Every structure is written in structure tokens, then in C-alpha cells.
Image: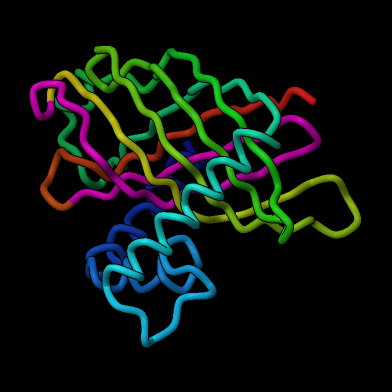
């Protein structure tokens, strides 16, 4: 109870912050992170050149991860709906056990940051099959002299849900955090929401790296 109360409190604080962030600021963050704007791009680059350089860099990142990355297994373990944002009758109808499985490839790049591609299938809050495939970029730091690593970054993905867009895959970008010890990692993404009874969900999965 104390754990869930703390998560709800932090979720409410995060919800307030998310509502203050515009799409423009999100893209500015992506640009400075190096995910969208290549380091070699200049202010003199035309939009076409900028897009071309960005595409080339994205292809390089994905290709390197596919070629150099280790195979990884994913296991969704928990979805927590922030209690402050949901009516009790909705919560009573939802499941918070997203039974599923996934596979991917991941690596730590030259800067020590994690990059990985993945595909997962799991049950959504209604118990219906949901599918997600994407790419994660997580700046990572070693905790002291231990083998524990922690990081926070973002993931871009395509997702398919039966209750949204007639099951047609839709794109998204979410903040993601990770704590790992040797081959085992616990990762989670936060899905923000605006209208009541929608979004503001913490999605957590486990990941095992085969190397």
C-alpha cells in the first residue's frame, strides 16, 4: 500500500509536469539528445539535407545495434494505473498484469549509453492482445564501482491496440527508465494522459540479455 501510494504521488507530480511540456519542447530535447539532429549537421543545412543526414544517422544507429547487439528477452510484468486519474469502477474492470513476451537486440554504444530494438506482445488493460515494436535510447550511468547501471531516456515505437484506431498501428514517443545488474534489467515507460480515465500508466517489464 505504501509503495502504490508513493507511485501515485510521484505519478501525479509527473502528470502536472507533463501537462506543462509542449510538443515543441519535446522535439528540442530530441534534437539536443542527438537522436534527431546529427552531430555533423550545421545551421547552413537545408531542410532536405537535414532530413537526409538525420535519416543516415538513424540507419547507422539501427544497423550497428542489429549487427553488434546481443539478443534480449522481454517479459512485461506490471501496469500501474495512477489512482488519482481513474474512477474506481474503471479500475475494477482493468487488469494490471500484462502477460506477454518479447524479443530484441541491444548494446551499449561508444558513449556507454544503451540502445536497443524490440518487439513485444502483451495483454492491455482490458485483457486484449496488444503489440509494440520500437527503438530505445537510454543514457546510462554506472552506480559507483558496482555492476549496477541506471539510466533514463526515451523510446520511439509503433503500437497496435484493439480499442484504438481500429487496431491500425500508431507511432509514439515515451520516456523510459532502466536499472540493470549484469544481464538482468528492469525497465519502465510512463504513458501520460490528459482526459480522465485515460493514460497516466506506468508500464514495467523485465529484460534479460544473452551474452
Does the segment drawn in magenta span residue 179? Answer: yes
Residue under the image location 64 percent in, 48 percent down = 114
Q: Quadrant of residue 99?
A: top left
Place of residue 27 in the rendered image (x, y in percent of width and height, measured from the top left): 32, 67
Principal SS element in the magenta part? Answer: strand
Whether residue 6 is visible here, answered yes or no, is no
Q: Quadrant of residue 106?
A: top right
Residue under the image location 15 percent in, 38 percent down = 197
Q: Residue furthest bottom?
A: 44
Report the side of 121 relative to 70 (left or right): left
Place of residue 70 in the rendered image (x, y in percent of width and height, measured from the top left): 70, 29
Q: Which residues are magenta?
A: 164-193
Whether residue 168 is visible here, answered yes or no, is yes
* Foreground of the two, 11 or 169: 169
Residue under the image location 46 percent in, 55 percent down = 56
Report the side of 117 relative to 93 (left or right): right
* Figure quadrant of the C terminus: top right
Place of residue 165 in the rendered image (x, y in percent of width and height, measured from the top left): 9, 29
* Foreground of the two, 138 or 52: 52
Place of residue 67 in the rendered image (x, y in percent of width and height, measured from the top left): 66, 34
Report the side of 172 relative to 175 (left or right): left
Reply above or below: 195 against 92.
Answer: below
Q: Quadrant of residue 87?
A: top left
Report the side of 197 relative to 204 (left or right): left
Residue under the image location 29 percent in, 58 percent down = 15
* Foreground of the two, 40 or 76: 40
Amino acid at each position: 500500500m505504501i509503495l502504490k501510494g508513493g507511485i501515485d504521488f510521484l505519478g501525479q507530480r509527473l502528470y502536472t509536469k507533463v501537462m506543462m511540456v509542449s510538443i515543441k519542447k519535446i522535439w528540442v530535447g530530441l534534437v539536443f539528445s542527438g537522436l534527431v539532429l546529427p552531430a555533423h549537421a550545421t545551421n547552413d543545412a537545408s531542410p532536405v539535407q537535414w532530413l537526409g543526414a538525420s535519416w543516415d544517422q538513424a540507419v547507422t544507429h539501427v544497423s550497428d545495434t542489429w549487427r553488434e547487439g546481443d539478443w534480449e528477452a522481454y517479459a512485461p510484468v506490471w501496469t500501474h494505473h495512477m489512482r488519482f486519474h481513474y474512477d474506481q469502477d474503471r479500475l475494477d474492470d482493468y487488469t494490471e498484469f500484462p502477460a506477454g513476451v518479447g524479443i530484441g537486440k541491444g548494446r551499449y554504444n561508444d558513449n556507454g549509453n544503451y540502445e536497443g530494438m524490440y518487439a513485444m506482445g502483451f495483454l492491455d488493460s482490458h485483457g486484449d492482445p496488444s503489440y509494440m515494436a520500437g527503438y530505445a535510447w537510454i543514457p546510462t550511468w554506472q552506480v559507483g564501482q558496482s555492476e549496477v547501471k541506471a539510466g533514463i531516456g526515451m523510446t520511439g515505437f509503433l503500437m497496435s491496440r484493439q480499442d484504438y484506431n481500429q487496431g491500425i498501428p500508431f507511432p509514439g514517443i515515451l520516456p523510459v527508465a532502466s536499472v540493470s545488474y549484469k544481464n538482468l534489467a528492469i525497465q519502465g515507460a510512463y504513458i501520460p494522459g490528459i482526459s480522465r480515465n485515460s493514460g497516466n500508466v506506468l508500464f514495467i517489464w523485465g529484460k534479460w540479455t544473452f551474452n
